[in-house]
Amino acid sequence: MLNIIEGEMLMKKSLIALAVAGALTAPMVAQADATLYGSFRVALMSADDQDLDLRDESTRIGIKGDVDLGLEGTKGLFHWEGQLETTDSDAYDAGTGTFAARLAYLGATGDWGTALAGRQYHPHYLWVNIPTDIFNTATSDAGEWAQLGNNQHKRQDNTLAYLTPVMGGFQAALGLVIAGSGDDADDDVDGYNVAAKYSANGLYLAASYGDVDAIDRETWGVAATYDIDALKLVARYEEQENAGVEDEATEVGAIYNFGEGLSAKLRYSNLELNGNDGDQWAAEVEQKLGKGRVYVGYFDYDSDAEALAAKYVDRLAIGYRVDF
Amino acid sequence: MITKFRGLVVAGAVALALSQPVMAENVEVDPWEGFNRAMFNFNDGLDTYALKPVTKGYKAVMPDMAEEGVHNFFENLADIGTLINNLLQGKFENAGKDFARVSFNSTFGLAGFIDVASPMGIEKHEEDFGQTFGYWGASSGPYVVLPFFGPTTVRDGIGMYPDTLVDPVYHLDDTGARNALYLTRVIDTRAQLLASEKLISGDKYTFIRDAYLQKREFDIADGDVENYDESNF
């Protein structure tokens, strides 16, 4: 009897030893330094004179990491990010929605800067749009309505980019599109984008210029953000010339952080398309909850803005997001 | 012997000195006591024979959860008035939190029936126009008991009018629905008072008057009152 118990205890001990060993080896296997991450986002949209719409707000899942290249001071890196559709199965059937690549690039980074190749954010979107995009709703009929860089320079295939190291708060970037939309067989490079940013003491400044010769489009923009204690101010101006027609987007906004995850945002924006322009006023409250967040956004268009496009209608967005 | 006698005299004088301002204060805050007591008796009768039995019936019929939901619903509506009054008092941070409360409770909280904002950590405030006038420096004026509406002061009574204007229920077009909501709110308010009314001792009129006036002073100062200590009970 005693022996059996001892035997059981012995077995338990060796099982524990095994489990401990297993726990120790597991990180060894996963030592490829890759991060699996994701962000799931939905919003219930209530627009004037329209049905309620439960909408996916750019749910994505991705893998990124860096690898040892055996070089001193230079690492290899990779990043893939695909989209998921949480509310619409049609997107799966079409084969374009699920896991369609948002980002897919590789590169190398070191004290000399960073070089990237593949499908990636353009410097314009990365430095001018993202830092000033304060709202949770991603769609162009709500939070991202006045973003010219959103339409034209968000994520591009076939792109080479070089980013300088950060020097005294300054950084510059150059992106080259080898074969973008409207590919022109005559030119080796269809478009390019240069950008610079400065960041120090709560102040952030960025400027960008892009030219896509193949479709005769020039885009430039400037952005600024400033942190004063709990308050963050943002401003952005973009201009785009499409085959002679000039469009403009202006945005000024503020975020106030109440602490404990609660923040309120207010924004005025103006969009000029084909010679007509309109305004949008927007407000949002956001409560972060651990790795998740909820938000309620209000978007109010003036009548001129409503005339710009049918989708510019006053709306309320009730959103939920979880990240891992 | 003489010292003892002197001591008594001093004690008596001190007691007199202490009690006098209190008496003076009563006259000062409640110069219309006669009228007020008459109104109070009218309200008390109305309450005993109509409102309280109805409220008890309401509590008996309604499941606790539903009762809580109804209470949350009216509290959410009240947050709108609180938001406006916080703005008027220049308390922008509190106003921002009120806006967040109304936003989250009206949406995720299903039209306010569930108070999701409190567990999220967004604290609730209670402000009205009477408090705003007080915050601006207006003194309360004499204590008044209004028929049907109960205890108030001249200042707070005047504040009741703009309070009504910022009340979402007031802006309902459907008269039937509006009145039904008014009535439900009265019952809900009364239901909230059922527990605390057991604390009343002594002269009911004086007790309620003093409790009301102290509560208002406390609210206007947002709890930052002299001689107030939470542990001092």
Image: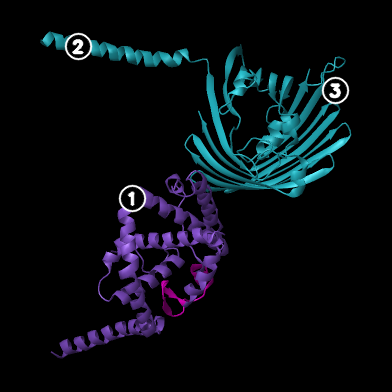
- Residue at image position (41%, 13%) is A25
| Colour of chain B in the image | purple
The amino acid marked with disc number 3 is Ala
Residue drawn at x 48%, y 54% as measured from the top left: B76
Give residue B64's mark.
1
Same subunit, tags 3 and 2: yes
Give the residue at mark 2: A8
Q: Disc 2 and disc 1: Cα gap in Å?
A: 53 Å
Left or right: where does residue A104 sit relative to residue B14?
Answer: right
Chain letter, cyan in picture: A
Secondary structure at numbered mark 2? helix
> CA–CA distance between discs 3 and 1?
69 Å
Stretch of the chain drawn in magenta? B130-153
Q: Residue at x 41, y 75 (%)?
A: B147
Residue B125 visible in the displayed image: yes
The answer to which of B156 and A249 lies nearer the viewer is B156
Estimate the spatial distance between the alpha carbons at disc 3 and disc 2, rounded to whole Å. 76 Å
Magenta segment includes B224: no
Tell me the SS state at disc 1. helix
